[in-house]
Amino acid sequence: MTTFDGSPWIPVPLAAALLRFVWFIVRRFVLRPGPLEAALADISFERAERLVIPGADEGEIQIDRLLLTSQGLLVLEVKDVQGTVFGSDKMQDWTVIAAERRFTFANPQPALFDRIAAVRQIVRQVPVTGRILFPEGADFTKGVPSLVCKLDELRDEFGEPDKLAAKAKIEAFKPHWELIVAKSRPALPV
């Protein structure tokens, strides 16, 4: 069909059905959270990403992710690497060997300890812990360092199956969460 001026005319019900279909596709396949986002949503009640807070000693320190969980505050660093990872608590550098590539990076645990200390300096009455998360595709064949975990382990450790019971804990932690958010600023884009 065409209108008087020759432009195509789409009946309103057909246009509405087409829009509903497009919105369904976008929600289902484009806006669907990935495994990392789904896990973080499962364990956290509030989240802040890429923030800068005062350091424990001096200066400032950047935190990738800070989560309010039913167990307190969780400083989370995500290492998205694929391959076999050779690292331990005492090694200075960790090595990743993938199919056609090999690289090293500094042991992330000392920096994580500094981030935990900086958060603890601001919120002294709240439990603060940290984890280095390797989401998928990383294998530790010679043992897993103490603060390293995978997505399932993160959910098991910090997940709260009884959300109602967690609410009282969260309410107690909330003023401390608001304090750290107030003392932080967004990190500059990289």
Image (spheres, rainbow, N blue to C red):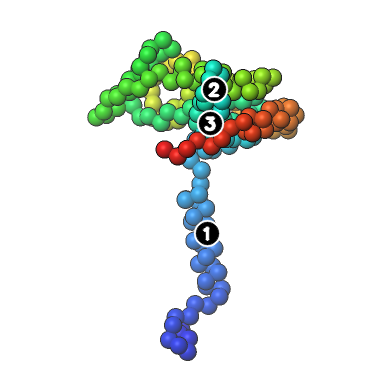
Front residue (pair 88, 155): 88
Total numbered circles: 3
User: In front: mark 1 or mark 3?
Assistant: 3
Residue flagged by tag 2: what amino acid is it?
A: Gly
Residue visible at 62% across and 31% down in the picture? 183
Q: Secondary structure at mark 1?
A: helix
Neighbour tally class for label 3: few under 14, some 14-19, many 20 plus, Cα within 10 Å: some
Residue visible at 45% across and 88% down in the picture? 5
Label 1 close to label 3 by CB (< 8 Å): no
Label 3 close to label 2 by CB (< 8 Å): no
- Which residue does the numbered mark 3 point to in the structure image? 52
Place of residue 85 in the rendered image (x, y in percent of width and height, measured from the top left): 36, 21
Closer to the chain start, of discs 1 and 3, is 1
- Which residue does the numbered mark 1 point to in the structure image? 23
Indicate whether 30 appears above or below 119. Answer: below
**Marks 3/2: CA distance?**
9 Å
Label 1 close to label 2 by CB (< 8 Å): no
Seen from this angle, which residue lies furthest bottom? 4
Place of residue 71 in the rendered image (x, y in percent of width and height, measured from the top left): 65, 24
- Which residue does the numbered mark 2 point to in the structure image? 55
Closer to the chain start, of discs 1 and 2, is 1
Residue visible at 35% across and 17% down in the picture? 93
Indicate whether 19 appears above or below 62. Answer: below
Q: Secondary structure at mark 2?
A: loop
User: In front: mark 1 or mark 2?
Assistant: 2
Place of residue 128 in the rendered image (x, y in percent of width and height, measured from the top left): 61, 21
**Marks 1/2: CA distance?**
45 Å
Q: Secondary structure at mark 3?
A: strand
Q: Is residue 56 found left or right of 171 in the rendered image?
A: left
Residue flagged by tag 1: what amino acid is it?
A: Trp
